[in-house]
Image: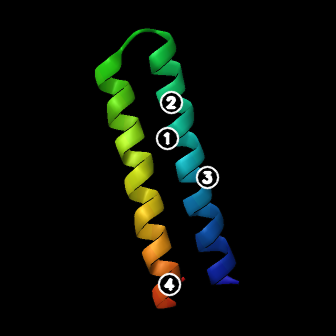
Amino acid sequence: MPDEFSRIIAFLAVVMALLFAGIHFHHGNIVATLYFMTGAILVTAVTHLSVRRGLI
């Protein structure tokens, strides 16, 4: 169960980061867009490595 919960939380974090990036892109704020896109990429990479190592 903790594995499933951790994966869902990681997925929601990526979704929220991409949503915020889209909102800021729509408003023309490029710095915030890049910030959230970078965050989404980093969360995805860390989650992928954690799953491969069996941590979650």
Residue lying at the far left of the rendered structure = 31
Name the image quarter holding residue 56. bottom right
Nearer the camera: disc 3 or disc 4:
4
What is the crowding at mark 2: few (fewer than 14 residues within 10 Å), some, or many (at least 20)?
some
How far across and how far down the image is residue 38, in percent?
35, 43
Kindly check if marks 2 and 3 are in contact, taking CB atoms under 8 A apart as contact. Answer: no
Label 1, label 3: how far apart the Cα atoms are: 8 Å
Give the left or right position of residue 31, taking residue 15 as reference.
left
What is the crowding at mark 4: few (fewer than 14 residues within 10 Å), some, or many (at least 20)?
few
Residue 2 visible in the current orientation:
yes
Residue 20 is tagged as 2
Q: Which tag, 4 or 1, sits closer to the chain's start?
A: 1
Label 2, label 3: how far apart the Cα atoms are: 12 Å
- Which residue is depicted at the point 59% across and 45% down? 15
Nearer the camera: disc 4 or disc 2:
4
Q: Is residue 55 above or below residue 42?
A: below
- Which residue is depicted at the point 36% across and 14% down? 29
Tag 4: residue type? Arg
User: For the residue labelled by badge 4, is the local secondary structure a helix, a strand or a loop?
Assistant: helix
Tag 1: residue type? Ala
Residue 17 is tagged as 1
Q: Which residue is mark 4?
A: 52
Q: Is residue 7 above or below residue 14?
A: below
Q: Which tag, 2 or 3, sits closer to the chain's start?
A: 3
Residue 55 visible in the current orientation:
no
